[in-house]
Image (tube, coloured by chain):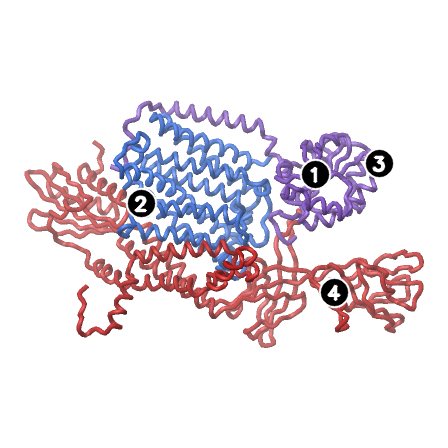
Amino acid sequence: MARENGGRSWLGAAGSNVWYFFNSLKLTISVLISLAVVSILGTVIEQNKSAGHYAGVLGAKWAKVVMLLHVNNLFHSWWYTALLLALAANIVVCTFERFPPKWKSLLNHKQEKFDPRIIEKFAHNRSVSVSVDAATANARVGRVFKKMGFNVITSNDGGDHFFYAWKGALSRLGSDLTHVSLLLILAGSIIGSYAGYKDYRFINVGDTIEVPNAGFKLRLDNFWIDQYDTGQVKQYNSLVTVIDGGKEALTKQIWVNEPLAYKGIRFYQSDYGMAWDKIDTAYIAPVKRKTGDTGAPVPVKWGTEEKLPGTRYSVKVTGYLSDFAYDEKTNSVGSLTPEPNNPAVRIEIYNAGRLISAPWIFLKYPGIFPAIPADQDVDIAFTNYKPTLYSGLSVNKDPGTNIVWAGAIVMGVGFIFAFFMYHRRVWVHVKETGGRAEVRIGGMINKNTLLFEKELCEIAEYVEKEGKKT
Amino acid sequence: MILSLLFFTFSFVFYVVTTLLYLGHWAFRKKWLGQTATAMAYIAVFSTTMILIMRAAESGHAPFSNLYESMVLFVWATNVGYLVLEYKHRQRVIGVFVMAIESLAMLSAALLPYKFKSVEPLNPALQNKWHWMADILRHVGLEKYAIGWLDFHVFTTFIGYGAFAISFGLGIMYLVKGYFEDRGRRNAFVDIFPDTSMLDELSYRAIAWGFPFLSTGIISGAIWADYAWGTYWSWDPKETWSLITWLIYAAYLHARVTRGWRGKRAAYLAVAGFLAVIFLYWGVSFILPGLHAYA
Amino acid sequence: MADTVNKDEGGGLPKAAIAGIVIAVVVVVALVVLYGRKQYEPVNAGQDALDFTLTDLNGRQVSLNNFRGKVVFLNFWATWCKPCEEEMPSMQSLYKALEGRPFEIVAVSVDKDGTGEAVRAYAKKYGLTFTILLDKNGAIKEMYKTTGVPETFIIDQNFVIAEKVWGPKDWGQRSSLTTIIDLLQSGPKPRDAYKPLKAACGVCGATLTGC
């Protein structure tokens, strides 16, 4: 490339060097292999773990290296992003350099008249001599090209007849479309990682949550689990309602693989669990303190008062903790874990409408503290319960997703052009000499030379025998 | 009786027999060995197809849901791809390499714990169905066989792997043949190989199939992940290794048109790519921990 | 030219001969495989129990055959499996309750640790007195085609599997013990009286989550 020296600033020269650095296929291969190798590292070294974890696995020295170079979060590190951007720059520059001339040559590829000698120079060519006149030969050439789906232009110059045929020119755009699609995908993923978020919320049945950064609410109307007849879980389902501006905007059943989308935010059924602060029904039984006999348990629904038969009491369940723990310092109770390790209910005990006691009673420790201290005969036991399930929803917003899908579609089209179409160009020259037609056939294909050889054979044979088997 | 397991054993034996026949044809150069080998390869693909059909009938869903089933799919795809290759180009020596890979693949599936071979219903995350397809199949009562992005993802990815297995065999053959060609040495067995330019061309043809299918597989996998968990890409080891594989084959495609990278270096990339596929399949599931443990 | 068939080959055979060879191979393979077709049956109620020999916690070799003639409770478990942990105490209670009767519990641990240290500690912690065997390379669990832990096989006095239970059970509840009690009281039944059931919930290591 001739470059002017005099009027060029060093910046222009440097910029030019940078440009040509990116205009290299060798760079492409280097970046692709580098990305591959570095990504391997990111799978072998566990990501997003603490410094202590790496120290344990790799030793203190290497752990320091890992943290310093962000190998612990490699795929979001600056240098991984730099490699991706280098690839993007590589694509942009190469396309800028190579696409215009390609486009130009595609627009001007047709050749009306040409020097017949070029046909022999092609790597793929054939000559046939047929004992028919030129007109017949020309007709055959025209027919075989039509049969094989080629576009043809013809011209004559006295006794010389020229054919130029082509097929599948779009194939040449395949690589460019694919490259553009990669840029789209990269752009979409970058937009998504900066402008999107991912959150997780669990909701108990009947509760409503405020959706972050969105201005609307979501209410869980119901949650249930479908099972196969063997008892194994088939699907988790939630029935949710969107409440926007105080009105119910949308109600939908969601399950795993079937999310709800509203105003650019999507809700996914992620998992579920048993609530640690609420139950559906407690089974409460009266106990004769002297003998320890436990009577038949009575189901008591959350928040409703039920009479305990055989006693003068009625009970109401107002609290539940799955793993009851008492904190002396703050004099409060709470659940140590979400697991039902120490289930306890707080019940209000009424006698003839009067609240006489409001203790916590424990599933695993019946009778540890008498529920009604004043009563020597009757105690209350918590024997079983029906849990309230909460639904675990994943809340996502990703504005880049659609750009990524657009890129995927472009990539698909690009692949079809690049891998399943071929650009062939065939030149044919027919000249009649001494009652015989001399036909020369030759051309080029951008890939799959084996196929092209077959096609040329087919053309030659047709011209020779017109498809008749001798 | 679990018929799919029965057909698996049939197929395993057929692949071993086919490998031996191709090997015999390579060693003894008798045409009838080659013809029988080809015939057995057709029997093997039929038997493998039966495994998948029986599996679908036994499990009530598309037969791509675990390591065992997908291995069978891989073997099936490779076999179909090879038969097309042999039909078009009739180079039976390639069969030795491809069928050896098939036999090893069947062996590895046979060694899986029984847990993978037993037929179990799908857990919630694996149930992704295209509504339009379920609606159409509902008319004939076959809606449970409707597939979705997940099955499409598994299917396209494994067609890709099948093509890559073939290009791996061709890459190895290229390197061996190239070794002999460079030194001008003659060897009764290697001389029968197609020449390096044809091996290179065929390897490219295989990757030209594999690469778009792998890409479609990765993208449809991302679409499924987006439906199931809301994130189309989370850099878990399986996703990352599929990207690594993709990068290696992308490098291969560019190497073929770059001076200094054609021929031998491209063949190395073709070999490396399939090694990445093997790690992607087995290494990630059994050596690395992760969300994608493909059980 | 790329498409040539290998030319310097001799010994082609007519298509019929090739077909003949292929059919012969297929028939032979089919016969051989079908002869061993038992291995394609799942191990379930109504089938014979399969004998095996494993090492117990004292290093002695113990065979399932040693217990032939008794009602055997064959349980596959692991120290890392929570549902197994939940059912162990009820298994110990059952064992104690049926002491003196022709009833044995054989608990096969599939823990991969060959020394058995974890298993020994576990047995001590829960005061387990029944036979505990170590299947560290998983060969026996493969033989019994288990897909997770815990799985229990109730074997009758004729060494036939009377019941297969997937997942844990409270072995203190009468409803869980109908098969065992029935076998002890009325002896073994004819094979077809045992109904194979399908899988249920609560199994560790099975490919399903979130039961």
What percent of the width, then of the height, locates residue C67? Answer: 75, 32
Instruction: Look at the picture and state if C79 lies above or below B27.
Output: below
Location of residue A139 by image quarter: top left
4 or 3: mark nearer the eye = 3
Task: Give the amino acid at mark 2.
Answer: Lys
Q: Do the CB atoms of the residues marked 3 and 2 lie less than 8 Å apart? A: no
Q: Nearer the viewer, residue A97 or A51?
A: A51
Instruction: Look at the picture and state if C146 lies above or below A28.
Output: above
- Residue neighbourhood size for the residue with mark 4, other residues' Cα within 10 Å, grouped as few (<14), some (14–19), many (≥20): many
The subunit letter for the residue under badge 3 reads: C
In the figure, what tint was chain A given? red
* Residue hosting label 2: B264
Q: Do the CB atoms of the residues marked 2 and 1 lie less than 8 Å apart? A: no
The subunit letter for the residue under badge 1 reads: C
2 or 4: mark nearer the eye = 2
Screen quadrant of the N terminus of chain C: top left
Structural distance between the alpha carbons of marks 4 and 3: 43 Å
The subunit letter for the residue under badge 2 reads: B
In the structure shown, which secondary structural element does the residue marked by tag 1 occupy?
strand
* Residue hosting label 3: C100
Q: Which chain is blue?
A: B
Any part of residue A5 in sight = yes
* Residue hosting label 4: A321
Instruction: Look at the picture and state if C6 lies above or below A316.
Output: above
Task: Give the amino acid at mark 1.
Answer: Leu
Q: Do the CB atoms of the residues marked 3 and 1 lie less than 8 Å apart? A: no
In the figure, what tint was chain C given? purple
Structural distance between the alpha carbons of marks 4 and 1: 40 Å
In the structure shown, which secondary structural element does the residue marked by tag 4 occupy?
strand
* Residue hosting label 1: C133
